[in-house]
Amino acid sequence: MNKELNSLSVRQLTELYRKKEVSPVEVTTALFEAIDQRKDLNAWATLSPELALQQAKEAEKRLLSGQPKSLMDGIPYGVKDIIYTKGIRTTMCSRVCENFVPEYNAGVIDALEDAGAVLLGKLNTQEFATSAYCDASIFGPVHNPLNDTKIPGGSSGGNGAALAAHLCPASVGADCAGSIRIPSAICGTVGMRPTFGRVSNFGAYAHSENTDCIGPMTRTVYDNAIMMGTMAVYDKRDPFSANRPSEDFTMGIEEPLKGVRIGVLREVYYDTADTRVRDAVEDSVALLKELGAEIQELKHPDPDGQYAAAAHTVRICDMYSNSRRYINESPELFFPATLEHMKTGEGYKAWQYIDAQKLRAEFRKKMTEEMAKLDALVMPTMPIIAPNRGQREMSVNGKVQPLSILFSLYTIYGTGLGFPCLSMPCGAAEGNLSISVQLMGKAFDEAKVYRAGYHLEQALKGKEKIYR
């Protein structure tokens, strides 16, 4: 196996393809070899080698003739196994759907196919994408390639693991309460939860149609911006899809940060985050300031937690509504933890759901006004470092809390608001563990988020630090 081909980024592949120095067929073949050697990770649910090689050959012809479809032409990728792929089983990693083969693609798969991307296969996830542990799946638990004693995060855990292990340069994840951002943070990769409606949700299992977002997961910020430009396409089949013109998110990404206004939500994380996480984020804020950004500290936007609770209520009620048929028909087919989690919405009243939606709208209005004076907000992705496999609670600053709360303590704000949120590495802890920062932008302003993230990523190179 050619390890160099296996480890190339999207940007590197794009440049090498244009120079005709590397072919999509070579890269695709190298990736399948790598996947075969890392079966121990359980990152993949279903592979599609015949389709991938066919798509790679077609891309190679276009590239050799100098007529690429897009920057993603010939780029191999994987997709979370709750997103429909025509003719390729989409199992939700559950016995309930293990033989389901869609007759059509999800909107995002159509967009990537139109761009010439190469589909390697489906990535493992927690059953029905219900939690961040990634240990309840018919394909077995996903393992963390950075440290096998730790979870990979989730629910897009297969994505995070495959990217970190260099089994694909790009992938499609889905995020409700943090399912793109949490595995990105734990696996040391980059994940974007886009503005709600920016990317089509058509043809994906609806965990919560009011909060779900499909987004790109990569190893670098620039790669993520490339992929987002392909994925962000209006889809009339999705009632929430935003009818906006296509956008190249790499345009202007390298422009200096001088004058960019960044708010810091220090009151949100300073006392609630692991000190290693806090210190890494504080150093990132200092770097952004050195790069020319104007830093402004903000008050806690949700001091009593009512807005975060509202976002959770909407998510939980939607999840129960969408899974009720499966629960009633085949409860015995679920993993017990999945069934228990799905049924948490059973006892909610209609007025609670309606009040939660009103609070979400109130929070969006409040933060839209606050963000009018800013280009981005900064906070950690998570308050914790990667937990151990099998662990269900953790002590942070002397306070023991359930991981189910800690995972989404900060990611839930992006969920409730529907604003774009980028998770990216900003440091490391002992044991080869990743620490990540989260950058949140205004609605449909992913470009500025990518710009800040790109410059921070470049500034961090060569300044790797182990936080203790």
Image (cartoon, rainbow, N blue to C red):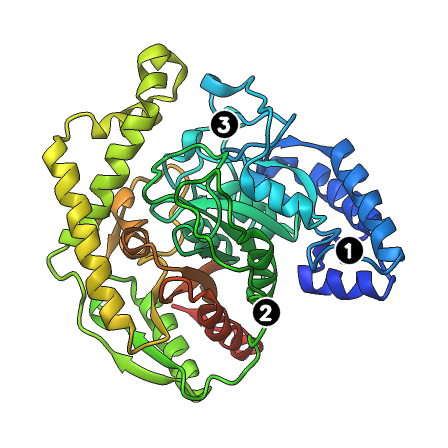
Numbered-mark total:
3
Packing grade of label 3 (10 A; few <14, some 14-19, many >=20) is many
- The alpha-carbon separation of the residues under discs 1 and 3 comes to 30 Å
Q: Label 2 belongs to which residue? A: 250
Question: x%, y% of residue 1?
Answer: 81, 48
Q: Amino acid at mark 1?
A: Leu
Label disc, if present, on residue 192 of the rendered structure: none
Which residue is denoted by mark 1 in the rendering? 5
**Amino acid type of disc 2?**
Thr
Please tell me which residue lies in front, 431 or 63: 63
Callouts 2 and 1 close, C-beta under 8 Å: no
Do the numbered discs 3 and 2 sit on residues whose CB atoms are within 8 Å? no
Numbered disc 1: secondary structure = helix
Q: Which residue lies at the image location 47% right of the left edge and 23% below the top edge?
A: 94
- Mark 1, residues whose alpha carbon is within 10 Å: few (<14), some, or many (≥20)? many
Tag of residue 93: 3
Q: Quadrant of the C terminus?
A: bottom left
Tag 3: residue type?
A: Cys
Mark toward the start of the polypeptide (2 vs 1): 1
Q: Position of residue 27 (x, y in %)?
A: 79, 50
Q: Quadrant of residue 252?
A: bottom right
As measured in the structure, the alpha-carbon distance from the residue carrying label 2 to the one carrying label 1 is 23 Å
- Mark closer to the chain start, 3 or 2: 3
Q: Can residue 85 be seen by looking at this rendering?
A: yes
Describe residue 115's horizontal placement relative to residue 291 as left or right. right
Distance Cα–Cα, label 3 vs label 2 = 34 Å
Residue 150 visible: no
